[in-house]
Amino acid sequence: MIGAPDKAESAAPHTSPLLVIQGMEVGFDGQAILPPIDIQVAPRSFWAVLGPNGSGKSTFVRTVLGLLRPVRGTVTRAPDLRPCYVPQQTTLDPIFPMRVLEFVLMGVLERGRLWGPARREDIELAQNALEQVKGSDLRRRLLRDLSGGQRQRVLFARALAARANLYVLDEPTAALDITSEREVLDLVSALSERRGAAVIMITHMVEDGLARADHVLLLDRDHGVAVSGSPRDIVNEPALQRLYGPVVARPYEKPP
């Protein structure tokens, strides 16, 4: 679904970590809400961030993106880090009077040129991004007229147009039907597998997170849990069993 990166992007692949998080404690007003977190986010890695509502997932992401300062510890970002945050499609204003192509074009302009009319190459890049998510037929439609699955594809097109190397996804399958969920998860997997970007995905879909990701961060503020590891490691964590029960009590393999 998502094509390979442009030659200019793939000529010199990034091999060192995009993020190095050391002893990071997140919280507010100097009060940590989770134990220290130590992880490295490398190119092509796929991190699933799991935890119940109110577990600290959003606070973790906001701290990683630099919107909040760590209470303690450090977040070291690579000099060439190009992050892109993809919100839930349900956060889009349903009366926002913007057409799909214009919305995707904003992703192109976010790369540094914020003012002035769109150039031909900008429009071509936005159209190409829509093609990659099978959304070309949506380009003239208003955002408010799209279904949930269509909106999510448009959000991904905008993210692709930004040519980020780190995608942070907030519940990308929220409020979607089963077919749309599968399509969106395929898009997420392709970001790391085909484009070489790193992915951090907050998800409530525990089984899909364990199956698709190669790294998992499990958070539970109420019980003081911040555990990271491979899906095979995390599936055996007592904290996971306590939160989600035996339904995920088996090892998961990343689909081929």
Image: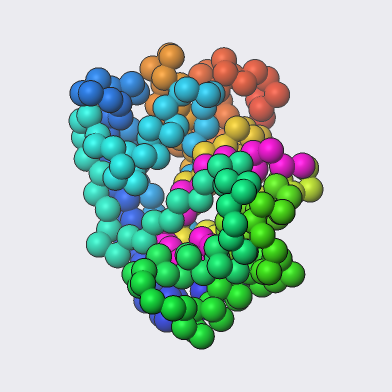
Is 215 covered by the magenta stretch?
A: no
Residue extending farthest bottom: 120
Residue in view at x 40 percent, y 65 percent: 110
Specify how the rendered protein is coloured: rainbow
The x and y percentages for residue 96 are: 58, 52
What x and y, as percent, mark residue 30?
A: 21, 23
Residue in the picture at 65% in, 25% down: 249
Residue 164 is covered by the magenta coloring: yes
For residue 39, above or below residue 14:
above
Pick the front one: 78 or 174: 174
| Horizontal arrangement in the rendering, residue 207 relative to residue 119 (left or right) | right
Q: Quadrant of residue 123?
A: bottom right
Nearer to me, 237 or 146: 146
Highlighted magenta segment, given as a residue range: 158-177
Q: Nearer the viewer, residue 169 or 175?
A: 175
Q: Is residue 170 left or right of residue 70?
A: right
Q: If the image is split into quadrants, where does the N terminus sit?
A: bottom right
- In front: 169, or 253? 169
Q: Position of residue 137 (x, y in %)?
A: 74, 69
Q: Residue at x 28, y 29 (%)?
A: 25
Residue that appears at 42% across and 27% down: 56
Task: Judge left or right: residue 197 versus residue 138.
Answer: left
Work out whether residue 163 can be spotted: no
Q: In which quadrant of the rendered image does the C terminus lie?
A: bottom right
The image quarter in which residue 132 lies: bottom right
Asked whether residue 24 is in view, the answer is yes
Quadrant in the picture for residue 26: top left
**Relative to 210, is 190 above or below?**
below
Percent coordinates x, y for residue 185 in the rendering: 65, 50
